[in-house]
Amino acid sequence: MSSDVSGGASGVVSADHAEGYRAGRTLPLRVEAMRQLRRRRTLVIGAVLAALPFVMLAAFQIGGTPSRPDRTTFIDLATASGPNFAATMLFVGTGFLLVIPVALFCGDTVASEASWSSLRYLLAAPVPRARLLARKFAVGLAFSAVAVAMLPLIGLVVGTAAYGWGDLKLPTGASLSAGEALPRLAVAAAYVFLAEIVIAALAFWLSTATDAPLGAVGGAVFASIITGVLDAVTALGGLREWLPAHWQYAWADALQPQLEWGGMVQGVSLSLSYAAVLLALAFRGFARKDVVS
């Protein structure tokens, strides 16, 4: 095993032959998860996501049932049933809202250690660099998955309490039974998470390249906004299919009378392909980085 040091300027002594040292036992997932769970930003994001369904419910109670004569969306059907309210929360979160916690959990994780000047001490423990990144990204993804699942799940509970348990009415005019709608909503939420992995990987790569957490998180959010704007430029034609934002609402195919996988498969494939490249850049760059923070 090669020595893992925090850089030439830090002067960390190798622990290759230290008695009892096992690289595979350093930085357990449970320890890293508890560290991230106790952070204030985690609690704030959790509170905001938990409160959002109640805010939407209050808005519907005050403003009444939305309706548009030209077209129908999930928002227009939000008050039809609990499953409809859950689908509405997923619709509201897709595109921007859920990008923020994903970028925060994955973009803040390494850069924050550097900004606190504690990253070099983690490496001096010594935690191998590749293991450090793998652990931090895994925990960031786990928290991101919980964030994505929270929105429709709490929406389902709140919507059922407010509007009752019933069929999921679709914008096309069809409907799904409540029993069939639940696994379809689970598929839709899983797709949203997988489609956001490219944002997670981008934020994580930026986190390894900068000591500014806000720069890493903001960079990933900004990239998401830009791809969304470009996707709206119809002059780009087929080139838009190479943008992750082009497939962000493909989860709606899971909420059709006949489940369609085509768009979701393309969206997930694109997201994972870009994520693999970005993660490779993150691991390669961090392995050669002189960490002095």
Image: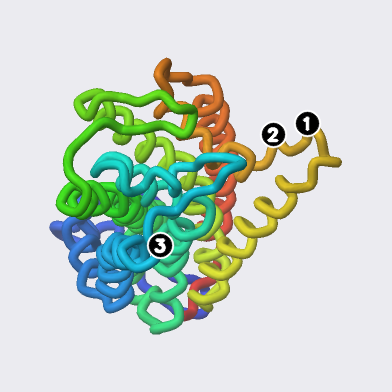
Q: In the displayed structure, does residue 47 sit left or right of residue 69? A: left
Front residue (pair 83, 221) = 83
Give whichever of 34, 243 is nearer the camera.
Answer: 243
Marks 1 and 2: in contact by CB < 8 Å? yes
- What residue is at 15 percent from the left and 52 percent from the top? 161
Q: Position of residue 6 (x, y in %)?
A: 44, 70
Q: Amino acid at mark 2?
A: Glu
Identify the element where label 1 is drawn.
Answer: helix
C-alpha span from label 2 to label 1: 6 Å
Residue at (17% x, 39% y) in the render: 165
Local secondary structure at mark 3: helix
Sooner in the amino-acid sequence: mark 1 or mark 3: 3
* Scheme by which the image is coloured: rainbow
Q: Is any part of residue 65 visible from this angle?
A: yes
Q: Which mark is residue 149?
A: none
Q: Residues within 10 Å of mark 3 (few under 14, many from 20)?
A: many
* Residue picked out by circle 2: 241
Determine which residue is flagged by label 3: 101
Residue at point 66%, 52% (across, down) = 228
Q: Measuring from the top left, give residue 265's x and y in whole percent.
A: 51, 25
CA distance for labels 3 and 2: 25 Å
Secondary structure found at label 2: helix
**Label located before the other in sequence (3 or 2):** 3
Measuring 68% from the left and 51% from the top, which residue is drawn there?
Answer: 227
Would you say 240 lies left or right of 214 here?
Answer: right
Packing grade of label 1 (10 A; few <14, some 14-19, many >=20) is: few
Q: Gap between marks 1 and 3, in whole Å?
A: 30 Å
Residue occupied by mark 1: 238
